[in-house]
Image: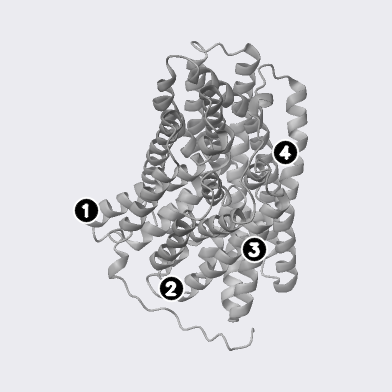
Amino acid sequence: MLGIFKSNLKESFSTIMPIVLIVAFLSIFVPVTPSLIASFIISSIILIIGSALFTFGVDISMILIGEKIGNKLVKSKKIWIVLLVSFIIGTVVTVAEPDLRVLAQQITSIPTLTLIIVIGVGVGLSLLLSSLRSLYGWSLNVMLLIGYIIVLVFTFFIPEEFVPVAFDTGGITTGTISLPFILTLGVGLVANRTDKKAQESGFGLVSLCSVGPIIMVMLLALIYSPTSSYDPYNLIRLNINFIDYIEQLKISISDVIISLSPILVVFVIFQFLTRAISKIEMRKIILGIVLIFLGLTLFFTSANVGFMDMGYFIGKYIAGTQYKYLLIPLGMIIAFYIAIAEPAVQVLNSQIEEITEGNISKKTLNISLALGVSIATGMSIIRIFTNTSFLYYIIPGQILSLVLMLFCPKLFTAIAFDAGGATGGTLTAAFLLPITIGICLATGTNVLKGAFGIAALVSLAPLITIQIVGIIYKYRNKTVINVDDLDDSIIDFDWGEEYD
């Protein structure tokens, strides 16, 4: 196990250090206070350790829990149990998502708890439908097409200011807590499938869970007025001290406990009813949960102290100078490495490489994801400078991603849409979003209309880039993964039999 952790630590270091070096280089030309640059470096070290601990913990606990629950649900042969458990898990892990809580607190026109619960229900319903798809082999393309058509129709009936926020929820809800759990649940649900398309059906749960929240928030937009009193001026701390870390550590510990508790309750109930996990597996799971707790606590503390403050400052300062357009390539470079450093992305890529037996390599996924996120970030900054509508970017992008489904192997489509739910994570909210908010402050752009929406565009990018990679794979080597020609039969479940 120590060797695996060292590997995770090395990987975390190699992905986060480029961001540190870029910011260190910028500090030569930007009047960053010694306190702020010191806190950024300290936070980077903590972030590297936290990310490694989290990834290691997920590998030995969350993945096992998700697969066990998925397998047991299939073996129960009772469709109502699958639907009920899927809905509960989807709702619980979403309500527990720390990234969602951060976003919800910025939307002051809707009560935070109301927004979180409604989004959680949206994910629960989406996971319910996703589970049915995994069991029966329903077409992901058709389900996604229907979902996004509903979303696109809604955009014409809600206030424009609310559209970026609604799309952001789709990218943020499937984050560091929920993504590994949902992803492995899908793997567990198809474990007993005998057809060759079982591999394809194991992916796609995350993608559908990203559509539900968007629709639910758009429904709320028909009731509430989309306003926000978010004022980041008071959050730009140029002098950070030890007390700031202690205060944030307390908040992070509380948030992580709240985030993990619902999942632990579901796990305890599952184990009590099924006894599906052995003592050896239980020890691994307990160790993994402890590591996840430590890793997330360190990760969120460092992301909110140092990283966020640096993001605000860089965006606001450079945007107020004659060199403001340098923020476009700069933001793209930073976003490239942030996409690779996101913990949820690393979990997803590792799972994909393992399940596809190396046919889809982690390196290929990392590069295609990072390029897409980089381009999306550049477009987000251009959108602020030109003060153009978010709709001009999101609608053509969504249409393009749906058109690509017609030419892309279904497995790559499922992976692409899952990746979209993984990219808009903690580092996006803690560094890229503050940069765009800082730009809005310097340029006088409406923060709600200008800064928000970056998580949505970042989540949209993999839908396009990975599907393009899939099309290239299809035409360059059809024998590697050509799921369109594989057996289409689905195992016949007798849902009427009693659980044995």
Residue on which the image places disc 3: 89
- Quick one: SS at disc 2? loop
Residue 333 image-quadrant placement: top left
- Real-space Cα distance between discs 4 and 1? 47 Å
User: Is any atom of residue 359 visible in this view?
Assistant: no
- Quick one: SS at disc 4? helix
Residue on which the image places disc 1: 476
Viewer-proximal residue, 97 or 293?
97
The residue drawn where x is 35% and y is 76% is 488
Image coordinates for residue 23, horizontal then vertical, percent: 51, 21
Residue on which the image places disc 4: 252
Residue 323 image-quadrant placement: top left
Q: Nearer the viewer, mark 4 or mark 1?
A: 4
- Real-space Cα distance between discs 1 and 3? 40 Å
Viewer-proximal residue, 221 or 437?
221
- Real-space Cα distance between discs 1 and 2? 27 Å
Mark number displayed over residue 137: 2
The colour style of the image is one colour
Viewer-proximal residue, 440 or 194?
440
